[in-house]
Amino acid sequence: MNDQRKVIFEQRKDFMAEEDLSDTIADMRHQVVRELVRKHIPEKAYAEQWDAAGLHDAIAGIFGIDLPIAEWAEEEGIADEEIEERLIKAVDQRSEEKSRELGPELYREIEKMVLLQTLDHLWREHLVTLEHLRQVIGFRAYGQRDPLNEYKSEAFVLFEAMLDKLREAVTGQLMHVELTPNDEENPLLQPVDLPPMQAHHLDPMTGMDEFEMAESAINAGSRLSETAERRQPLQNRRAGDINPADPSTWGKVPRNSVCPCGSGKKYKHCHGRHD
């Protein structure tokens, strides 16, 4: 966690020092396109096996552009590299249009603001996820796996996933950002809202969400604690917790003690005689 924190803080300091982050944003944008192409057009797959519709929907959702990807895929002799080049050219053109629409100087400020805001949000979410992972990783020992090594390995995978999410979230927001004027003299920037924090993690061996399992265990423990409280001996309870008219608040009453109902009789000769 400390190594990851150093990487993020150093990166954030570099971002803060730069006035123009357009090159960094462009690298993120291109990396998102490459990952989408790699996902929907697997290496060495035939054109008939390409998921052109899925790639089209992903590009439209993130970049807000409608491209004839299905038609490209039907072209004779076309390869994934050529589709990737066309997509990069199209998304760069979309970014230039946004820059002209909002103004180059303002768009540079927006790029920096969105990048820093999204990085901070995802880093906080990542810390929450790591803390949840730390709490449940001990269960891996039941599968004859070393929890420490499992934690290091999983934390690295989660960190890489966070960086992927950062590139996609920043790119998507910048492609959809708009200026909404409150009045003619004071336009306010309205970026896409950041998603709420989430903490989910699948055990790579079982496919089960470990965090949901842990939450269920915690909730079950709370219910057991409430039950244990109701079963506490009478002498261990506070006087304000006992209601003479409600036997459920009495807990476990010794048979020779005075009955909590206020009759003055011993418990075994009063309410206890029904036990």
Image: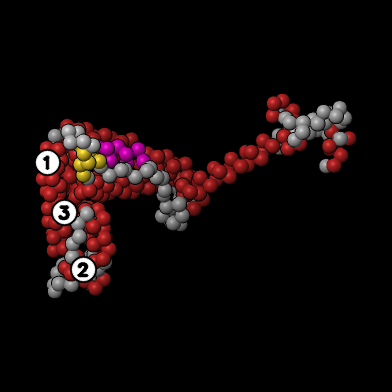
**Dot 2 or dot 3, earlier in sequence:** 2
Q: Which mark is residue 246?
A: none
Which residue lies at the image location 69% right of the left edge and 29% below the top edge?
Answer: 241
**Position of the C terminus by quadrant:** top right
Q: Give neighbour class at mark 3: few <14, some 14-19, many 20+ (Cα, 10 Å).
A: many
Q: Give neighbour class at mark 1: few <14, some 14-19, many 20+ (Cα, 10 Å).
A: few
Residue 123 belongs to magenta span: yes
Position in image of residue 167 (x %, y %): 24, 47
Could you tell me how far apart the alpha carbons at marks 1 and 3 are, in whole angstroms? 18 Å
Q: Secondary structure at mark 3?
A: helix
Judge whether residue 175 can be spotted in this image.
Answer: yes
Q: Which residue is mark 1?
A: 103
Q: Quadrant of residue 80?
A: bottom left
- Which is more foreground, mark 2 or mark 1? 1
252 vs 104, nearest the viewer? 104
111 vs 119, nearest the viewer? 111
Q: Which mark is residue 91?
A: 3
Relative placement, left or right, of 85 versus 123 is: left
Q: Amino acid at mark 2?
A: Ala
